[in-house]
Amino acid sequence: MKKQQSSKLAGFLAVQLVTCAAFGASWLVLAPAQAERVTEVVTGEIKFSPPKIERQKPLVIKPLYDDPEVVSDEELAAVLIQVQPQFPADNLRPNHVEHALRTWHVDAEFQDPSVMSGADMRDLLLDHGRFLLSWGPDVAPLLEDRPTGVYVRWGHDRGASVHHDHTLACLSEAGVPLDQPVRSPGRPNCAKKLGEGG
């Protein structure tokens, strides 16, 4: 009986040893990115390495054509008047601001004080205090502090950006540089820079 138990124990330990050896061997042949991903899944912690970005300001792509036969200056002016960023101050939807900022640029200024400037639009997206003035404390913040940095809340909830990564895309297309301060709920007075990681 003891011999049989000892044999079963030896078989069990052998299977465990083979399993561990197979796991170890498979770990050794994983590419570094795969090993990092397995570690993230096992530990539940995401390793964040901020990307190296070579420039502080986004590239500017200028239009190739200015053909008045396609759109005259008068026709263009009529459209631009209609798409001025003239929004209500309360419950100002981030996606409306993102599209307007993308259209007008961060340096946009208007003679009409009821129209938001590019700087005002940028600040609504990057300054939690400005967001609070529009939405109040009962709506979840647009900016969320996370271990890897500042996250932009997106989806169809009230006060959220509608599309994933849309805020960042619009800010870069509007010419907002990486050294632009970001004031999130956890850092209202100690702003991170737009290009800084966690």
Image (cartoon, rainbow, N blue to C red):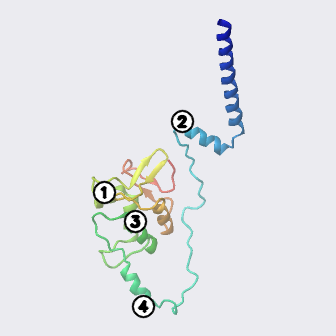
Q: Residue furthest top?
A: 2
Q: Quadrant of residue 8?
A: top right
Give the SS element for disc 1.
Answer: helix
For marks 4 and 3 on the same chain, the one whose residue lies earlier in the sequence: 4
Q: Is residue 74 above or below residue 30?
A: below
For marks 1 and 3 on the same chain, the one whose residue lies earlier in the sequence: 3
Contact (CB < 8 A) between labels 2 and 1? Answer: no
Q: Which mark is residue 132?
A: 1
Q: Where does label 4 land, which residue? A: 74
Q: Is residue 84 left or right of residue 167?
A: left
Give the label, 1 or 3, closer to the camera.
3
Residue 14 is situated, as x and y percent measured from the top left of the image, at 69, 21
Q: Amino acid at mark 1?
A: Leu
Q: Residues within 10 Å of mark 1 (few under 14, many from 20)?
A: some
Q: Amino acid at mark 3?
A: Asn
Task: Give the CA separation, mark 2 to mark 1.
Answer: 35 Å
Give the SS element for disc 4.
Answer: helix
Residue 159 is situated, as x and y percent measured from the top left of the image, at 34, 59
Q: Is residue 38 above or below residue 70?
A: above
Q: Quadrant of residue 89?
A: bottom left
Give the label, 4 or 3, closer to the camera.
3
Task: Give the CA separation, mark 4 to mark 1.
Answer: 39 Å
For marks 4 and 1 on the same chain, the one whose residue lies earlier in the sequence: 4
Q: Where does label 2 land, which residue? A: 43
Q: Amino acid at mark 4?
A: Glu
